[in-house]
């Protein structure tokens, strides 16, 4: 997925930096960037939060980089 690579490079980060944030190997993360492996939902959530964007943007379902407003359900579930 080129968007993951573009977002990472925009922050001047290496694959190993993102892999460390996700608590995984650099090799495992690189497979997400090139599209060899599907990205689990929890990882997509972490990446969207980290890059302040939406999962739809990461998956190329929209070109709108701005994240959606947070759901009120998230606040209720976290209490």
Image: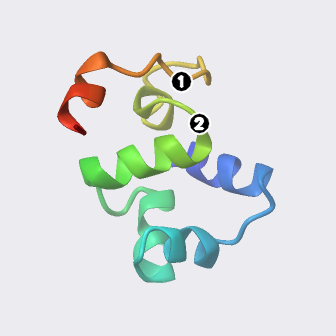
Question: Is 6 left or right of 52, judged from the image as shown?
Answer: right
Q: Nearer the viewer, residue 52 or 5?
A: 52
Q: Secondary structure at mark 1?
A: loop
Residue 28 vertical placement versus 66 (above, below): below
Residue hosting label 2: 52
Residue furthest out toward the front: 79
Earlier sequence position, callout 2 versus callout 1: 2
Q: Residue 78: percent from the left, percent from the top?
A: 24, 39
Q: Which mark is residue 67?
A: 1
Q: Residue 61: percent from the left, percent from the top?
A: 43, 23
Q: Residue at x 41, y 76 (%)?
A: 23
Could you classify mark 2 by the number of other residues whose Cα lies within 10 Å: few (under 14), some (14-19), or many (20 or more)?
Answer: few
- Residue contact at pointers 2 and 1, CB within 8 angstroms: yes
Question: Is 4 left or right of 24, judged from the image as shown?
Answer: right
**Split into 4 quadrants, where in the image is the C terminus?**
top left
Q: Which mark is residue 6?
A: none
Residue 58: tell me if it is visible.
yes
Where, by quadrant of the figure, is residue 25 drawn? bottom left
Q: Residue 65: percent from the left, percent from the top?
A: 61, 24
Residue 39: tell me if it is visible.
no
Q: Residue 33: percent from the left, percent from the top?
A: 51, 59
Q: Nearer the viewer, residue 49 or 65?
A: 49
Q: Residue at x 27, y 29 (%)?
A: 74
Residue furthest out toward the left: 77
Could you classify mark 1 by the number of other residues whose Cα lies within 10 Å: few (under 14), some (14-19), or many (20 or more)?
Answer: some
Between the C-alphas of marks 2 and 1, the distance is 6 Å
Q: Residue at x 61, y 21 (%)?
A: 66
Q: Residue at x 53, y 24 (%)?
A: 67
């Amino acid at each position: 997925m080129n968007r993951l690579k573009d977002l990472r490079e925009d922050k001047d980060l290496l694959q190993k930096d993102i892999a460390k944030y996700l608590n995984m190997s650099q090799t495992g993360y690189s497979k997400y960037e090139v599209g060899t492996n599907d990205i689990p939902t929890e990882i997509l959530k972490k990446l969207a939060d980290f890059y302040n964007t939406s999962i739809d943007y990461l998956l190329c379902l929209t070109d709108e980089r701005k994240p959606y407003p947070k759901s009120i359900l998230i606040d209720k579930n976290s209490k």
